Image (cartoon, grey):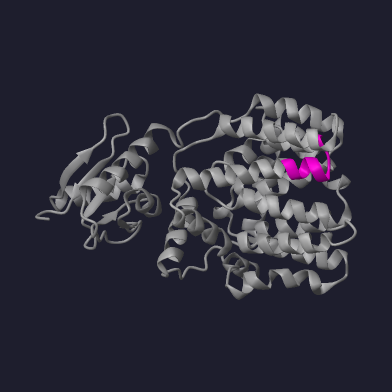
């Protein structure tokens, strides 16, 4: 291409186009993004007590909500981080890996989720790209490392990798704020090798190397696993030593977590460094393949979740502010209904004594097998229903 500024502008424009093609204005069914939004609300009200997630991302969402922004504003902030990531890789490295990022399906999918994967990828990738530059760039790298730690616990892998590579423990200092705010709850899993160990490591290895990475790199049916694994292996081989250490430590943290947590989201922050390590010829092929599989704009979860969210929005305008709604996905319901919500018991006796309303869905087996018989037996009253198919029904407590 022509020059670095022009390259950066063109790739930024490409990222805007692909992000727009993939943008989903609906709340993701993933409960974690709803929990992030609620944590941001708790920060605004002074009731934030959770240490499940790093506090940095909820703080960003609190700022957006405090300024009057809603779900779309929070999603657009993540999109801006995605575009910035593409521009950063173009400016500090080359346009080919940036283009591969701009059309990578998992990167685009998470660019429309209110989650920390893309902001963390931006901060951690920029840190790795500038840390070896001379002058005051170490300050930029330190700030990026600090932000990474406030976004995700896996920043510990980045700090350790820099400390090992440079043989200087000072690179752990930027992570102090994350530990000071007790933001590394997931890191507790590093010290717990209890139930399911080592089976969970085996299951995680099979999933990440046999499915997640290959499908992210080569999203072509039938040839994904073998070819994707070869591309990943070559990329790791070509990585600089410091990045190899980071890659290994990061995956080491993920592998030791319960295999029930496994998800493509955990490899999203590593995909930029994989693309950066690949030769131009391979990136050209990935650009073409990725361009064919850019996720289309669609409602998250299809009609089932559209109806689920319609029922939650109905509760916002048709129930008292003090109402309590029982649901299978309480965080999602609480975000949309602005009513307190809790999840019913999945095992043992069914107890809905705390609920004023119940959102019954056709998505989860517990709703059909456990909750519906309880509601019928105890004469709960249906007060709202979405159309068929995938009908969701809101029930009201008798005599409420």
Residue 198 screen position, x and y as percent: 65, 61
Asked where in the image residue 108 lies, by quadrant, the reply is: top right
Between residues 77 and 322, which one lies in front from this camera angle? Answer: 77
Residue 395 screen position, x and y as percent: 20, 47
User: From what the image shows, is residue 269 above or below residue 52?
Assistant: above
Residue 193 screen position, x and y as percent: 63, 68
User: From what the image shows, is residue 69 above or below residue 195?
Assistant: above
Based on the picture, tell me whether residue 94 belongs to the magenta stretch.
Answer: yes
Q: Can residue 147 be seen from the camera position used here?
A: yes
**Marker count (numbered):** 0
Residue depicted at 63% across the width and 48% down the height: 118
Asked where in the image residue 123 lies, by quadrant, the reply is: bottom right
Q: Can residue 225 be seen from the camera position used here?
A: no
Residue 302 lies left or right of residue 125; in this view the side is: left
Q: Magenta part of the protein: which range?
A: 87-96
Residue depicted at 25% across the width and 51% down the height: 358
Which image quadrant: the N terminus? top right
Residue depicted at 72% across the width and 55% down the height: 124
Between residues 68 and 270, which one lies in front from this camera angle? Answer: 68
Based on the picture, tell me whether residue 321 belongs to the magenta stretch.
Answer: no
Between residues 301 and 74, which one lies in front from this camera angle? Answer: 74
């Amino acid at each position: 291409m022509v020059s670095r500024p022009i390259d950066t502008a063109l790739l930024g424009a490409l990222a805007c186009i692909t992000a727009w093609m993939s943008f989903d204005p609906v709340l993701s069914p993933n409960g974690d993004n709803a929990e992030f939004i609620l944590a941001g609300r708790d920060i605004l009200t002074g009731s934030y007590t959770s240490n499940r997630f790093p506090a940095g991302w909820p703080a960003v969402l609190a700022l957006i909500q405090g300024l009057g922004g809603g779900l779309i504003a929070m999603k657009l902030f993540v999109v801006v981080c995605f575009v910035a990531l593409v521009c950063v890789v173009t400016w500090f490295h080359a346009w080919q890996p940036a283009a591969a990022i701009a059309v990578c399906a998992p990167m685009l999918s998470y660019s429309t989720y209110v989650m920390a994967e893309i902001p963390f990828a931006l901060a951690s990738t920029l840190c790795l790209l500038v840390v070896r530059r001379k002058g005051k760039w170490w300050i930029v790298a330190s700030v990026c490392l600090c932000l990474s730690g406030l976004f995700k616990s896996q920043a510990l892998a980045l700090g350790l990798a820099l400390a090992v590579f440079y043989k200087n423990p000072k690179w752990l200092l930027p992570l102090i704020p994350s530990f000071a705010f007790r933001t590394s709850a997931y890191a507790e899993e590093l010290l717990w090798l209890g139930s399911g160990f080592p089976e969970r490591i085996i299951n995680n290895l099979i999933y990440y190397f046999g499915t997640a990475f290959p499908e992210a790199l080569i999203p072509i049916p039938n040839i994904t696993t073998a070819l994707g694994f070869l591309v990943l292996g070559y990329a790791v081989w070509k990585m600089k030593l410091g990045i190899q250490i980071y890659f290994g430590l990061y995956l080491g943290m993920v592998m030791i977590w319960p295999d029930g947590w496994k998800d493509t989201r955990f490899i999203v922050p590593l995909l930029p460094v994989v693309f950066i390590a690949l030769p131009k010829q391979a990136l050209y092929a990935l650009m073409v393949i990725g361009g064919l599989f850019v996720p289309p704009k669609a409602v998250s979860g299809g009609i089932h979740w559209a109806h689920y969210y319609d029922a939650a929005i109905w509760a916002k305008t048709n129930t008292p502010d003090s109402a309590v709604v029982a649901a299978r996905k309480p965080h999602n319901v609480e975000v949309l209904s602005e009513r307190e919500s809790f999840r019913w018991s999945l095992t043992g006796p069914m107890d809905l004594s705390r609920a004023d309303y119940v959102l019954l869905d056709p998505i989860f087996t517990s709703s059909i097998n456990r909750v519906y018989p309880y509601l019928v037996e105890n004469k709960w009253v249906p007060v709202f229903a979405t159309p068929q198919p995938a009908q969701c029904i809101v029930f009201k407590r008798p005599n409420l």
